[in-house]
Image (spheres, rainbow, N blue to C red):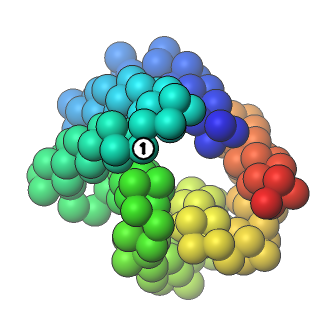
Amino acid sequence: MLRFALLVISCVIAAPALAQQPVQAKSAALIGIQALGKQAKATQFDLAGKPDEARKLRQEVIADYDAYLAQNPNDLSIITTRASIKEQAQPGSGKADFEYVVAVTSKDIADNPNNYGSIGQRAEAYEGLKLYENAKNDYNTAISLSSGDDKRRYATKLGIMELDAKGK
């Protein structure tokens, strides 16, 4: 539920900026908004004890992201999001995506250690891999290097991850 709430908050925060984004970003945002509706419905099915219906909707979302990634294969944010949805649909199925994001961002961070965007992206992938200490370290680094909305986003993600860890 906390992850779903974060997705809703992210969409609300991003909506005003969509008009200023290039066409490629609008496509990713549109897919994200459509996925949000399907994810909400999948969560309703989960809560109603209908896992097959939830799984089917998540597979549709994954297919939507696959289509987008066919045109934009280097969009690490979408790869990470798709991995998270894969994990919800079938535990373990997003691992390769998360590992790919860690590899790409780690190379970028080696070349530019102050790139808080890559550090934050890697934190999300570590979280997906359940490497919580690595994720926590990266979130804290991203928080210290960033400002404004980016700083708040990383702090929120860190807080949600820590709450999720306490609930498990």
Mark 1, secondary structure of its residue: helix
- Three-letter code for the amino acid on which mark 1 is drawn: Pro
Q: Quadrant of residue 150?
A: top right
Q: Is residue 97 visible in this depiction of the protein?
A: yes
Q: How many marks?
A: 1
What residue is disc 1 on? 51
Identify which residue is drawn at 36% across, 29% down: 38
Foreground of the two, 138 or 32:
32
Q: Quadrant of residue 31?
A: top left
Q: Does residue 107 appear to the left or right of 2 in the view shown? A: left
Q: Does residue 56 appear to the left or right of 111 in the view shown? A: left
**146 versus 118 height, above or below:** above
Tell me the quadrant of the picture where the N terminus can be found.
top right
Residue 117 spot, x, y in % from top left: 57, 57
Identify which residue is drawn at 63% across, 66% down: 127
Residue 20 spot, x, y in % from top left: 37, 22
Q: Does residue 64 appear to the left or right of 55 in the view shown? A: left
Name of the residue lying farthest toward the right? 166
Identify which residue is drawn at 45% across, 73% down: 92
**147 versus 162 height, above or below:** above
**25 versus 70 height, above or below:** above
Q: Is residue 115 visible in this depiction of the protein?
A: no
Tell me the quadrant of the picture where the C terminus can be found.
bottom right
Identify which residue is drawn at 38% across, 39% down: 54
Q: Does residue 141 appear to the left or right of 131 in the view shown? A: right
Residue 154 spot, x, y in % from top left: 71, 49
* Category of crowding for the residue at label 1, using alpha-carbon neighbours closer than 10 angstroms: few (below 14), some (14–19), many (at least 20): some
Residue 52 spot, x, y in % from top left: 34, 44
